[in-house]
Image (cartoon, rainbow, N blue to C red):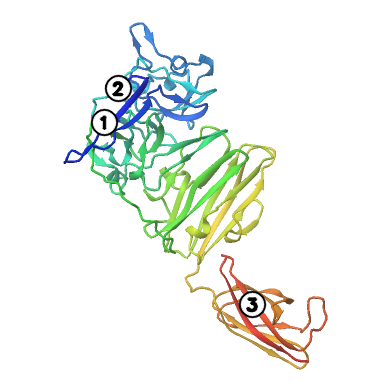
Amino acid sequence: IPLTRSGHSLTIDASDLNGNAAKTAVSNFRVSAPSIDAGLHLISLPYPRLGQTVGNITITPAELFGIPYDQVAMVRWVPTDERQSKYHIYPDEYAGFNPPDARGDNAIVSQPPVGLGYFIRLPKQCTLATDELDMLRDEETYDIRLIYGNAQPRGWNLIGNPYRSIVDWGTVGFIADGQRYDLREAMSEDVGITEGVLFDFVSTATGGYYQFSSDPAEDVMEFMRGYWVHVLRDATLVVYNPSVGTVGVDRPRRVRACQAPTDDQWTLQLSASSGPYLDPVNYIGVHPEATDGYDIGLDLGEPPPLLPGVALYMPQPRWGSRSGHYVRDVRSSLSECQEWDVEVACAAPNAPVYLSWANLNSTVPQDVRLTLRDVDAGRDVYMRTTNGYAFRTDDGPEIRHFKILAETRRVGSLAVSGLTTAATRGGEVTITYTLTRAAGVSADIRNIAGRPIARLAPVEAAGGVVQTLSWNGRNDSGASVPNGKYLVRLTASTPEGQTVQAIALVDKLR
């Protein structure tokens, strides 16, 4: 029986087998009505009687949220819609609590709006009027039909947690063509029902962005939260009631080891921001099981945007029925060179936009050279030497086109060998060295105490061949320095950020 919405006290007494009692523990708490903060949210409403007339009462959105009718901004995505934008806005009945596609023989849910997801924008924090509303209690399972649809973008469904408790997403099941599958089976290439990923919506001051777990089986559905899920064909989602204690598959939680990136398996997170707008959860990478086309479980499409702002994605217009915008694009690791198309869309005119990749050095191996190419501006940037790239939009909404090139050089680390010097009576010094791989080289001359004397012009040097530099025996001011012993410090750096140094003694003669 649910506790009343008031103050409560929990008292715990414990003793061992010999009768030795522990000190009584007391905790006070209050059960209050659920509330939703001001702003934009993706929610679910697990109350079967919403929108239905019981006696002479029909609970409308205005009554539920306690705000005037004209301030209710509620939106729902309808996957059977033939339009490209399948959003319906309340008071459209498809965006209401008892929509037409949730009624009749082919209803997507049995007790609407339970199991449906809604976007809602509230002008202030609202406490929901749910005192007289029941929730699902004894039902062991709740079914939600997932629609692939006939018009692009296909397969996207807004769903919600139907229960009062947190649901372990790893325990859900899927039914397709009369067969029942667990989550992992439904995600497999052989079955091919879904990528299995739950997209959560993170609310911000200007709207929000989507995020998702790297391992769908470790995710959860929270109370009163809505989610995006994508399917590759029509199916039924079976959600097991955690309060009843029956689950589809026994899936103990696993401790996942952090895998170090390798040439054959790495990912890079890309983010885009413009003022208060943010899109931070996008990935490119390589994997030994990936192809350069669509791979279920590796490549991941982007849920339909609700509001304009800033968006980063990898466009795939030539993937047939899988064409669209992707938030994760994983390629084959068999090729030593890969290329991704990346687009950044910004709705604001004359706005600064920043594309960033803050964790590159910890998630991508050092011998992978990454280059960002601004196709529209004709500019290349070595991604290891900077954390981001800035540009400004023109007079209207803009889509900026980029390419990211990854070149894997399967060679050893950068090193300097054979650093020697030879002086002549004319006062010049020849510096000889060899690099293990191509790099930019700079050298400076110092006295024995380490004080800088002269700096040589930087050069690009090839790997595996003997290279030479010359010092004219003068300081940076052009004056000849006295005979004696000096030091040459040579620094070699690759575009990916690998840097090594070597030091040798110089005998200067006139």
Mark nearer the viewer, 3 or 2? 2
Rendering coords of residue 414 (x, y %): 54, 74
Is residue 387 among the parts visible in the rendering? yes
Separation (CA) of disc 1 from disc 2: 12 Å
Q: Which amino acid does label 1 sit on?
A: Ser
First reached walking from the N terminus: tag 3 or tag 2? 2
First reached walking from the N terminus: tag 1 or tag 2? 2
- The residue depicted at 33 percent of the width and 44 percent of the height is 217
Cβ atoms at labels 1 and 2 below 8 Å apart: no
The circle drawn on residue 490 is 3
Decide if residue 266 is on the left or right side of residue 280.
Answer: left
Q: Residue furthest bottom?
A: 425
Separation (CA) of disc 3 from disc 2: 74 Å
Q: Which amino acid does label 2 sit on?
A: Pro
Indicate the secondary structure of the residue bearing disc 2. loop
Q: In which quarter of the image is residue 157?
A: top left
Rendering coords of residue 4 (x, y %): 33, 19
The circle drawn on residue 2 is 2
